[in-house]
Amino acid sequence: MINISEKLKSLRTKFGLKQLDFANSLGVTPQAVSKWERGENYPDIFILKKISNLFDVSVDYLLGTQEERRDTFEATVVCSSLNHFAQKGEILTAKELAEWTNTVFHNMTSTVLKYGGVPVKYTGDGFLCFFSGTEHRDRALKASRDIDRINSDKELVLLLHTGEIYLGMIGHPDYASRDIYGDVVNKSFLMMDDFSKKVKRGVGITNEVKDQLKVKYGFKKSVEVALPRLNEQKTVFQLKQ
């Protein structure tokens, strides 16, 4: 008998997702996920397809008829930065700054989950997540557009780039957390460093994202950003607000 429950739990824990994270990404209840993992119930074919998109595996793999799984997969990476974050720290106490930042991260995370994205980590004033599976570029841009609108009063900059990533648990086993690696991740952070200096706020995407979008969006300008460590330049297109 195919043990779907063990496979679902294995994937969830390998990706560092709590049952609540997994449930939110699929639009189901945590109780449903718990029942799947205990073998009391199983997801229907529609949910299996959502799971395959989330983890970038085939439905055949989930059903146990295909055992191969790639170490890397294509995804759209979204990273963010809050301009003038250091200056804000000069007028707020450490606790006030943490509370203000958490408010921003809370609505960003909720929006990412709404569109089937996977939050990865928070880094000071930055947030990192990814979208994989069907139409991941469009879902990432829709989430970023909503985040931009929700935070219209903040100098929040988001950047989207697409490529192959590796997702795994990083660090000492007792303290490990999920993280993503790959050329696309490195370049995203390097581009963000220059892009956030050239725009006050907004959403920027690379050609790798723009050329594969299913829906057409308006862009107000393009910005040339430098990747000095790689001796490269990339064009980032800024989404109209």
Image (tube, rainbow, N blue to C red):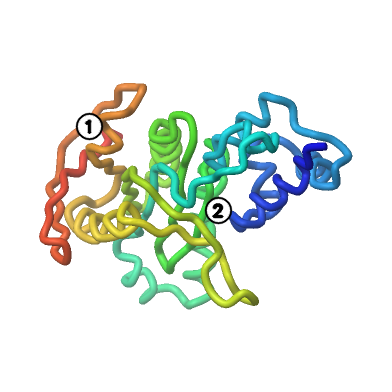
Residue under the image location 47 percent in, 40 percent down: 132
Q: Quadrant of the C terminus?
A: top left
Amino acid found under the numbered disc labelled 1: Phe
- SS class of the residue under badge 2? helix
Identify whether 60 is placed above or below 120. Answer: above
Q: CA distance from mark 2 to mark 1?
A: 27 Å
Identify whether 147 is placed above or below 142. Answer: below
Residue closest to the eye, 196 or 174: 174
Identify whether 187 is placed above or below 42. Answer: below
Q: Which residue is mark 2?
A: 106
Between discs 2 and 1, the one toward the N terminus: 2
Left or right side of 177 for 48:
right
Left or right side of 110 for 228:
left
Q: Which residue is mark 1?
A: 219
Percent position of residue 229, x then y: 16, 66
In the rendered image, which quarter is residue 35 located in? Answer: top right
Residue under the image location 37 percent in, 53 percent down: 79
Q: Which mark is residue 73?
A: none
Residue under the image location 16 percent in, 62 percent down: 230
Identify whether 104 is placed above or below 28. Answer: below
- SS class of the residue under badge 1? strand
Percent position of residue 239, x then y: 27, 36
Which residue ends up furthest to the right in the rendered image?
Answer: 40
Percent position of residue 186, x then y: 30, 59
Exactly how many numbered labels are in the figure? 2
Amino acid found under the numbered disc labelled 2: His
Left or right side of 92 for 193:
left
Residue neighbourhood size for the residue with mark 2, other residues' Cα within 10 Å, grouped as few (<14), some (14–19), many (≥20):
few
Percent position of residue 50, x then y: 61, 32
Q: Are marks 2 and 1 in contact (CB under 8 Å)?
A: no
In the rendered image, which quarter is residue 65 located in? Answer: top right
